[in-house]
Image: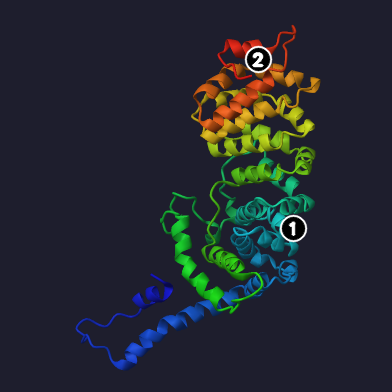
């Protein structure tokens, strides 16, 4: 049912006993009501978000949006981050346009704001950075990596997964439910797909009212701005906690070597390692921490820092062994990180290899290589092959140990 049909259903019902035939004037009023209601909502959207029509128009026409973000007032920040999240679900060209508009520094600045600002900024940055190296570089240039590390280490003491903001920053607008949990005021469970479906018809009407068909960027840009309007209307929170999303974004940024170096300089390797070992019991947060460590372990300084953190290798081995029933992806990441710690074959990595073997990683990896999923088998096999090139303190190759455990693919 589209928005006009729903509005028509909401029209005033005739009193009980009224004849079925409705006067012509009344029928005309009911027929015109939905169109007027839609226009009223469009006008309301323009009034509440004075920058939105200009942003949509500029994005579709391929014009600069720099002034819209440079002059943004604080009240519009959450809406603008929702808009960025929506439009960046599209093509790389849209992501570059958002970067060129100067939105990245604005979003990074929001990471130090209230709970609601942090959540929406993280969601926008994650979506914008995915598959776009230019945005990854822009986040680093805006000091986004130290800001993300501060999120991991905030709240004093070990990081926690508890995402309830302090009482002084809580408000009705900050109370949005996680998927599967009821809204604190309405009691209704969050359903992102249903929420999107509810707001999509209006978003399509709003974008159609811009009259931008046949513009340079075509229907792809129109679809992107439609999604941006949907996100503003729904203001739905991203799934997962701030800790998980911050670690996931650091994992994404790790595909750029320069970002790995910046992560070490900001103390992020230690923060992620502590998050894995003793920072939280929430499995999804620990999964994101393992993946972030793996993606950022190519830099030599990062390898050393990870191996030297007490309890990290033991935690990785327990994940490979399947303790606490980790998700399949988490076991892949743990095996991949164990491999990365000893690559390339170099004397600097000898100590890490010995620590891994002493933690009984080889039997655990052999079991995963024989009985895991296809991806788990590949990662475990790669780790075993990398360890086979090293020797113990007596000069005995670990290859013989791998053979003894029943793995011969080295």
Image side of residue 180 versus residue 170, left or right: left
Up-down: is 177 above or below 295?
A: below
Rendered location of residue 252, percent (x, y): 66, 45
Q: Quadrant of residue 313?
A: top right
Give the secondary structure at mark 1.
Answer: helix
> What kind of element bears circle 2?
helix
- The image's mark for residue 194 is none
Write the residue at 56% across / 43% down: 162
Residue on which disc 1 sits: 105
**Visible residue check, residue 282:** no
Q: Tell me the crowding category of disc 1: few under 14, some 14 to 19, or many 20 or more residues within 10 angstroms, Cα based.
A: some
Horizontal and vertical percent position of residue 101: 73, 65
Q: Position of residue 150 (x, y in %)?
A: 71, 44
Front residue of this view, candidates 49 and 206: 206
User: How many C-alpha atoms fall within 10 Å of the one at disc 2: few (<14), some, or many (≥20)?
Assistant: few
Quadrant of the rendering where the C terminus is positioned: top right
Q: Horizontal placement of 80 versus 7: left or right?
A: right
153 lies above or below 312: below
Identified at 66% across, 55% down, the residue is 128
Kindly identify which residue carries mark 2.
358
Colouring convention used in this rendered image of the protein: rainbow
Q: Is residue 122 above or below residue 345?
A: below
């Amino acid at each position: 049912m589209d928005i006009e049909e729903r509005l028509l259903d909401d029209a005033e019902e005739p009193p009980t006993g009224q004849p079925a035939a409705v006067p012509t004037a009344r029928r005309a009023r009911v027929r015109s009501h939905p169109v007027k209601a839609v226009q009223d909502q469009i006008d309301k959207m323009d009034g509440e978000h004075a920058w939105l029509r200009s942003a949509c128009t500029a994005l579709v026409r391929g014009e600069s949006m720099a002034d819209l973000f440079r002059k943004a007032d604080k009240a519009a920040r959450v809406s603008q981050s929702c808009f960025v999240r929506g439009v960046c679900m599209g093509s790389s060209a849209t992501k570059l346009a958002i970067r060129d508009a100067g939105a990245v520094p604005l979003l990074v600045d929001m990471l130090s704001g209230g709970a609601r600002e942090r959540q929406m900024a993280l969601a926008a940055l994650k979506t914008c950075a995915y598959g776009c190296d230019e945005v990854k570089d822009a986040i680093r240039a805006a000091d986004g990596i130290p800001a993300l590390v501060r999120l991991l280490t905030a709240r004093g003491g070990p990081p926690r997964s508890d995402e309830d903001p302090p009482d002084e920053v809580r408000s009705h607008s900050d109370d949005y439910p996680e998927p599967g949990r009821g809204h604190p005021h309405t009691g209704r469970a969050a359903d992102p797909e249903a929420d999107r479906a509810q707001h999509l018809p209006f978003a399509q009407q709003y974008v159609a009212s811009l009259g931008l068909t046949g513009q340079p960027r075509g229907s792809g840009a129109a679809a992107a701005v439609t999604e941006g309007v949907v996100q503003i209307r729904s203001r739905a929170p991203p799934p997962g906690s701030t800790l998980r999303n911050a670690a996931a974004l650091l994992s994404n940024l790790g595909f750029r070597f320069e970002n790995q170096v910046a992560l070490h300089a900001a103390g992020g390797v230690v923060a992620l390692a502590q998050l894995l070992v003793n920072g939280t019991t929430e499995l999804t947060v620990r999964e994101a921490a393992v993946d972030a460590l793996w993606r950022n372990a190519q830099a030599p300084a990062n390898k050393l820092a990870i191996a030297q953190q007490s309890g990290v290798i033991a935690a990785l081995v327990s994940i490979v062994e399947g303790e606490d029933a980790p998700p399949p992806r988490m076991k892949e990441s743990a095996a991949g990180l164990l491999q990365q710690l000893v690559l390339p074959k170099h004397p600097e990595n000898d100590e890490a290899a010995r620590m891994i073997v002493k933690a009984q990683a080889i039997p655990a990896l052999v079991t995963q290589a024989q009985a895991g999923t296809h991806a788990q088998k590949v990662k475990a096999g790669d780790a075993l092959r990398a360890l086979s090139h090293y020797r113990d303190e007596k000069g005995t190759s670990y290859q013989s140990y791998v053979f003894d455990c029943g793995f011969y693919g080295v």
